[in-house]
Image: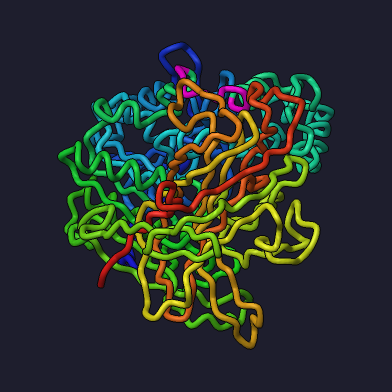
Amino acid sequence: MPEAYQGEQKYEVICRSNVMVLMRDGVRLATDIYLPALNGQVVAGKFPAILERTPYDKATLRNVVNGNYFASRGYVCAVQDVRGRFVSEGEWYAFAKEAPDGFDTVEWLAAQSWSDGQVGTMGSSYSGSDQSALATLNPPHLNTMIVGVGASNYYHCSMRQNGAMELRFMIYAFRMATTSKEALADDTIKAALMKDFENVGQWLTRTPLKAGASSLRLVPSYEQWVLDILTHGEYDDYWRQRGYAISEYYEEHADVPTLYLGGWYDSYARATCANFTALSKMKKSRQVLLMGPWTHGGWEVAAAGDLFMGTHSAINYNDLRRAWFDHFLKGLPNQVARWEPVKIFVMGSGDGKPYYLGGLNHGGAWRDEQDYPLPGTQFTPYYFHADGALTIEKPQQAEPSRYTFDPRDPVPTIGGGISAAMPIMDAGGYDQRGRLDFYGCHDTLPLNARSDVLTFQTEPLQADMEVTGPIQVKLYAASSALDTDFTAKLIDVYPPSGNYPDGYAANLTDSILRARYRNSWEKPELLEPGKIYALTFELYPTSNIFKAGHRIRIDISSSNFPRFDVNPNTGGALGMERRFELAHQAIYHTPDYPSQVILPIIAR
């Protein structure tokens, strides 16, 4: 675990609320400025500035605590409502337009009388992504960043994933609308929006979402945004906007020391690793990757779903960030100077016994590394077999495994790398069986008892095996449909025990591929029914020790709802199709068509 960092509080704090910062187009953004003070007066002198830009209300208790924390330790901390949210002027259109506003705010901070000219940025989720967006414009006074669970490309691994839509963003639109300017100004509008958000699970079953059908019509920019991301299936100029596609602007991205902070059960796990992997090779300044076992923003929590990782898995978020800023904005020779480029939490070394607060002791340990993917990774194919085996031996000739995918009865989501999806989906690791308290579940049976889920698993392992890094699935598949989806999920199967007599199937990571995008994200191609295609797609990364006696399992299906939107199988326009068809699927496992998962094995 990163070392604790105890910093002395030296100053009192004075907050100047709602300072209106002028943007290049005349819109003013409300910013709370926390300043070091003594004896009730702002300290004369110049300090480094730290900026966080948020759509979640700069005046929340968390932001007030953070502002006071950093200002009391010798920084000016600025927390800003992004355009169109709370006190800031303008219209909100989520994520896409943040780069210019961020640039202008960084430069405004650097020009103030209390500034020493240095600006660092911080924040997670939306506030992580908008940092990377502004960095693509390379502000002259940006000195360092701490990007917590931010985007690399919203099309490839966030709003959409391998062509499919992550429905958490539809939930997000309904949730954010309840605190829109319109809702805050009119109790009647707020009541209508609150009612729909409270019933958002019902809206997920009323797809495609129709313009004007929901209360989102009362907040037009919110409705337009969600309709746009539901219907823009191809990777076009819409997705190449700076706020969405950081990866398109890596060459222009600021070359400043950056800490990329992420979690294996976080919805931005793939994006966090992608940003570090690319920019650590392209930039001269120091880039650090820190991946814990956390769900979205859960750095100070020792569990992910039902899996307890150990108290050592949690970190003190502000102390960690303060150590980084002290080193890069004040030149202090603290623990950050000794950090290796990569620090990861390798899950899975626990004893599997019940934890007294609930859940299973999955455990794990921190480890330093020199790069990511880890040097010496052995990318090893594990092949699917007709009898359900998963081995390093190639398959023999056999009939394909077949199932029928009915869009009216999708496989329910049980955990995973999810964020901003409450109260519909819970993130983290869970036993892969139905739970009546989980959305979409109708029974408590194992998910792979369903006829539309195929399971391929190893024999019980003879020795511990570590899997750390990116994971790829290659399916040789055919379908009766013109378009359909294929899903894959990596699972750590615990053997039966007294507390889990049927064993425990802990999900680690998953993903999906929309078949029309098998060859190109820009130019979709429908399927020829019955034809065998090679379908390759990447799962989110993970780091896990499969202990001796455990099994490695891959579940293959065609839905994971409501994590992803359900493909109607017709080949019709995405986000607009009102028909559906059954899809009869075939997964091949022969010498000519060896379906497989490629695991990043770490030999230690």
Residue 159 in view (yes/no): no
- Where, quadrant-wise, is the C terminus in this rendering? bottom left
The answer to which of 71 and 145 lies nearer the viewer is: 145
| 311 relative position to 418: left or right | left
Observer able to see residue 516: yes
- Left/right of residue 286 with respect to residue 14 in the rendered view: left
Task: Estimate the x, y position of residue 264 in percent, counting from the top left.
Answer: 45, 57
Residue 68 place in picture, x, y as percent: 45, 50
Residue at 23%, 54% (x, y): give it: 371
Residue 153 magenta? no
Residue farthest along the bottom direction in this orientation: 498
7 or 212, which is in the foreground? 212
Q: Main secondary structure of the magenta part?
A: loop
Vertically, is 375 above or below 113?
below
Residue placed furthest toward the top = 25
Please name whichever residue, 138 or 505, is drawn nearer the observer in this view of the structure: 505
**Which stretch is magenta?**
229-237
Q: Residue 209 location in percent, x, y?
A: 73, 27
Q: Is residue 376 left or right of residue 95?
A: left
The residue at the point 35 percent across, 68 percent down is 466
Residue visible at 31% across and 40% down?
A: 120
